[in-house]
Image (cartoon, helix red, strand yellow):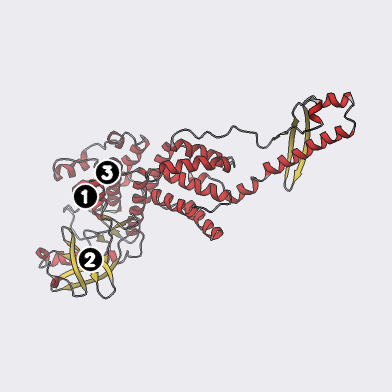
């Protein structure tokens, strides 16, 4: 490319993408000292006033969304030697199209995180009267933090700016066209949500739901072909996911989800329901668990004192008394009501059977069983990582954090880097357990990993904030 095609301010341009309306270049903004992406209208369209107007409207539409979540930021808009250009933030991670082409189907947890980020951007656009009209993996760009930003509103329409295309004209990409778009009808927010459901199908299976040999055949399949079950393409997906995708891909717009985030939430719920019992939101508050966890230790100490008193009274009464000796040879059960601040517990304390000689030299360990918390078997450390995580979670719910700790640590170690939902859950559960035990080591890192895999959750943010405050 000739440097004169861009203003002198943007130096060392390198083409990184070729699009329908124009090409995108990576360049250095000499005035601000940062790397940017510059989209330049293709030369063949420079004399077409209608397309020039559409290109300019793209900039106006996206500029209004620059502060919206997960949306590419616009820095500058201009016209250089008769060719309009848009300067945007540069995202070095490529697109979801690149990732799908390289790796195929993506891990469930990672897919959910990306879809949630894209959904937030689309819902924000719709709230501002903007319809994207070309939602596809190639327009979902990745930053160096592996988070999604929605780009290329080049065929978008802003309600108050008028339509970029007339009814009867098909705009978009065949593989992701909503049925109404394929019929030439005007696109709506529901059309974007349909396209996001196609992207979800592709992320989870590695295939588009209506893939055909030609673009025309694929576009028509969106209109009339039955929706295939995603679990047929990827047997690891639970059948419940098929119902969610079927609604997301409903032929009639009114039958789809009311928002993009509602669609992603339904996907998450179906996957979590199939994954097992572990749910982030079901975990009780940390402080309440920590205060209750002291009760078993206090009861144990009280029980020991009680047994010691019984033995001491027997010894003072005379060790050679046969009746006292006989009493010591039998198990003895004493019921005692112990009142602690705000708590009354009935304890059953049983002394183990000992001989007369043993009674004068050692005290048998008591067995203390509070009626409020029966003794349980130690947790097993065998099983799959997901099973370890589920058992750890159950122990957390019972307040048995010390027992849950090794199971969750093992689960996190074995799941590390898999991008599965189980990794997100185990990371959160381990962070929660460490905080419940008064520890700070690795808590924030674990929460960050959980959020990276499954997306933003208010429970994660709340625990991170608490950990940062108390752990410094």
- Quarter occupied by residue 352: top right
Structural crowding at the residue carrying mark 1, measured as other residues with C-alpha within 10 Å and reported as few (<14), some (14–19) or many (≥20): many
x and y percent of residue 354 in the render?
77, 26
The residue indicated by pointer 3 is 202
Residue located at (23% from left, 47% from top): 176
Q: Which mark is residue 101?
A: none
- Cα–Cα span, label 3 and label 1: 20 Å
x and y percent of residue 172 in the render?
20, 52
- Cα–Cα span, label 3 and label 2: 30 Å
Q: Which mark is residue 57?
A: 2
N-terminal of the two: label 3 or label 2?
A: 2
- Quarter occupied by residue 87: bottom left
* Figure quadrant of the N terminus: bottom left
- Name the residue nearer the viewer: 249 or 432: 432
- Name the residue nearer the viewer: 161 or 302: 302
| Residue 259 in sight here | no
- Cα–Cα span, label 2 and label 1: 21 Å
N-terminal of the two: label 2 or label 1?
A: 2
x and y percent of residue 213 in the render?
14, 40
Q: Secondary structure beneath disc 1?
A: helix
Q: Are marks 3 and 2 in contact (CB under 8 Å)?
A: no
Q: Are marks 2 and 1 in contact (CB under 8 Å)?
A: no
Q: Are marks 3 and 1 in contact (CB under 8 Å)?
A: no
Q: With respect to residue 251, does 85 lie above or below? A: below
Q: Is residue 228 left or right of residue 385?
A: left
Structural crowding at the residue carrying mark 2, measured as other residues with C-alpha within 10 Å and reported as few (<14), some (14–19) or many (≥20): many
Q: Is residue 436 left or right of residue 118?
A: right
The residue indicated by pointer 1 is 181
């Amino acid at each position: 490319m000739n440097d004169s095609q861009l203003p002198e301010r943007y130096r060392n341009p390198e083409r990184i993408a070729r699009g329908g309306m124009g090409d995108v270049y990576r360049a250095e903004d000499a005035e601000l000292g940062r790397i940017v992406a510059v989209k330049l209208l293709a030369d063949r369209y420079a004399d077409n006033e209608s397309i020039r107007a559409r290109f300019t409207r793209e900039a106006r539409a996206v500029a209004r969304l620059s502060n919206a979540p997960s949306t590419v930021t616009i820095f500058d808009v201009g016209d250089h030697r008769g060719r309009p250009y848009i300067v945007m933030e540069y995202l070095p991670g490529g697109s979801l199209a690149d990732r799908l082409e390289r790796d195929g189907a993506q891990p469930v947890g990672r897919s959910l995180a990306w879809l949630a980020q894209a959904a937030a951007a689309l819902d924000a656009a719709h709230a501002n009267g903007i319809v994207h009209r070309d939602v596809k993996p190639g327009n979902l760009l990745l930053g160096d933090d592996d988070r999604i930003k929605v780009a290329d509103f080049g065929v978008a329409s802003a309600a108050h700016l008028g339509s970029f295309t007339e009814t009867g004209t098909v705009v978009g990409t065949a593989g992701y066209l909503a049925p109404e778009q394929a019929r030439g009808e005007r696109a709506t927010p529901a059309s974007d949500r349909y396209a996001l459901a196609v992207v979800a199908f592709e992320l989870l299976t590695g295939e588009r739901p209506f893939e055909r040999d030609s673009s025309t055949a694929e576009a028509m399949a969106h209109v009339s072909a039955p929706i295939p079950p995603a679990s047929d393409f990827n047997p690891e997906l639970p059948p419940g996911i098929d119902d969610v995708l079927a609604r997301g891909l409903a032929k009639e717009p009114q039958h789809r989800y009311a928002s993009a985030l509602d669609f992603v939430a339904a996907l998450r719920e179906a996957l979590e329901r199939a994954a097992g019992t572990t749910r982030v939101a079901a975990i009780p508050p940390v402080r309440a668990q920590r205060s209750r966890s002291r009760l078993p230790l206090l009861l144990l100490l009280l029980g020991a004192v009680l047994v010691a008193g019984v033995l001491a009274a027997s010894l003072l009464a005379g060790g050679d008394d046969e009746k006292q000796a006989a009493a010591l040879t039998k198990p003895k059960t004493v019921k005692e009501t112990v009142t602690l601040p705000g708590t009354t517990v009935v304890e059953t304390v049983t002394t183990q059977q000992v001989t007369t000689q043993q009674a004068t030299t050692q005290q048998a360990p008591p067995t203390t069983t509070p009626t409020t918390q029966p003794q349980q078997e130690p947790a097993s450390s065998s099983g799959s990582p997901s099973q370890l995580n589920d058992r750890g979670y159950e122990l957390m719910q019972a307040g048995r954090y010390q027992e849950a700790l090794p199971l969750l640590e093992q689960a996190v170690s074995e799941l590390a880097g898999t991008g599965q939902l189980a990794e997100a859950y185990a990371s959160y559960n381990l962070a929660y357990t460490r905080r419940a035990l008064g520890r700070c080591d690795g808590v924030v890192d674990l929460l960050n990993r959980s959020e990276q895999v499954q997306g933003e959750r208010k429970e994660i943010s709340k625990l991170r904030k608490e950990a940062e405050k108390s752990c410094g």
